[in-house]
Image (tube, rainbow, N blue to C red):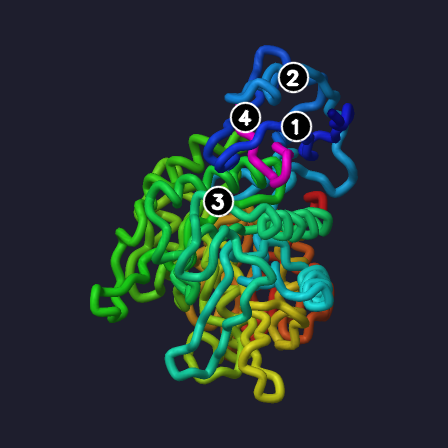
Amino acid sequence: MKFSQVVEQWGTFEIELHASEKFDNPFRDVWVQAIFRIGDEYKRVNGFYDGGSVWRIRFMPEKKGNYQFIVSSSTAELDGLEGSFSSTAPSEGNHGPVRVSGTHFTYADGTPFFVMGTTAYAWTYRPEEVRTQTLESFSKYGFNKIRMLVFPKYYGGMVNDVKIDYDPPVFPFAGKPKEFDFQTLLPEYFRNYEERVKDLMTLGIEADIILFHPYDAWGIDSGMRQADDLFYVNYLIARLAAYRNVWWSLANEFDISSTQEGMFCARTDRKDWDLIGATIKANDPHGHPISVHNLPMRYIYPNRDWLSHVSIQHPDTYTLLLELKHQYNKPIVNDEYQYEGNIKDEWGNSDGETTLFRHWLSAMAGAYASHGEVFKIDGNETDLFWSYGGTLIGESAPRLKFMKEILESCPYQEMQRDWANTDGHHYFALSKGIDEYLFFCRYDLSGKGFWFGSYDGSRTEYEVFVYDAWNCVEKEKLTVKEIEGNHLLPIKAWTVYRLKRKGKEL
């Protein structure tokens, strides 16, 4: 029996166990778990069956120091192993899992995390060449959270403009489409998926794992009963929770359903989402973020203890996000505000300017968003980045990277909406008291400038960085005083101003 004796903090420690006994269904018939202790603290972690004679237990050490563990199991061969390992300092770039901090996100080591998401629902089971291109696009444009389904995706499009129908090399469950045995999982499918999660972790990218979705031609979503749902969810927790970059999303569009006659409808009870969310919160030993995603015209999921942040779909990325921040007092992520692309359906034909504007608005609301791209190239209606990955070609991706760089240079999590410098159409503002400001202009507004400073007669001096948000350049650097500066910072389309009060460390 082999296992690593040294693991970095927030790395993955794994125990591999073998049993020679044969079982009718080793997924159902055997349980295995371990208790990990450091000092007076302990965590109980469930293991999982990984095919053949192999069971695994995975654990993410969240502290530095010496851990002891003991394994227990329903079968004697796997029961009673004891051991220890050391958790050492994290390597460069390992900031730990993302945690919720008020209405924002922070890595476990205290480093702020600014969500810059994108979408590639079914990239995980495409050929290696496509997966490589996809990872290169994620990294090239600075995306750090990827929305990705566990199950394969099918979509025909309301006007047959999009055709998403590739079968995965293997399916998640034993059997065949429309006749799956949902209590017998195929480890090969999940091994491939976890390798994609690890690929993202290597790049410092969060995997927003979408557990269920209705876009299915194989009888998975319609065939799984409640016992199957929980069986599968607990298997994924055991298999994936030890990776620090995991987020859980209960569903893509949880409120899509159909009538008995097969007509489209929207309702909230397709599955027991509260039970699934509470199960994840109770059984995930590492407390990863949990959300659930909606149709744009129907239900935003109500606040729950298990809901760490709000994931929505809606093209209003400013006023709605402000309302939701006030209502939930949790981070808000507009994970789908419609995609940049060239298909007929309105959800996938936004131009680059609209996409960039919507994303900037989410930030100026003190919230976050996820991008997506749906371009048909040479009439190819299948190989679309939004579903299968590949190479990003749109106008918004490089400009979103520039936006992220600007926002990460600010104390974003400490800034509030500055209503005095926001008209809700031409220009928007965030500020940290009178010490720092961020102004974003979408359209020209002749004769108007921004107001900033203390207005106590002291004529506070500011360092001002001026950016062109569309052409992705820093245009100039100014030093201005509060009164005269209000005339020197005009409202000009795609202009961003970052101000810092002189005497404060830049």
> Which label is found at residue 243?
none
274 left or right, relative to 126: left
Under circle 4, the secondary element is: strand
Residue 184 numbered tag: 3
Callout 2: SS: loop
Q: Which of these two is toward me, 49 or 412?
A: 49
Residue 243, quarter of the rendered image: top right
Residue 337 colored in magenta in the image: no
Q: Which residue is drawn at 54% across and 72% down?
A: 491
Q: Nearer the viewer, mark 3 or mark 4?
A: 3
> What residue did someone put label 4 on?
32
Q: How far apart are marks 4 and 2 (CA)?
A: 11 Å
Q: Mark 2 points at which residue?
A: 81
Alpha-carbon span between mark 3 and mark 1? 19 Å
Disc 1 element: strand
- Is-magenta flag for residue 50? yes
> Which residues are the magenta region?
44-55
Indicate which disc, 3 or 4, sits on the residue closer to the N terminus. Answer: 4
- Three-letter amino acid code at disc 1? Leu
Going from N to C along the chain, the mark reached first, 3 or 2, is 2
Cα gap from disc 1 to disc 4, whole angstroms: 10 Å
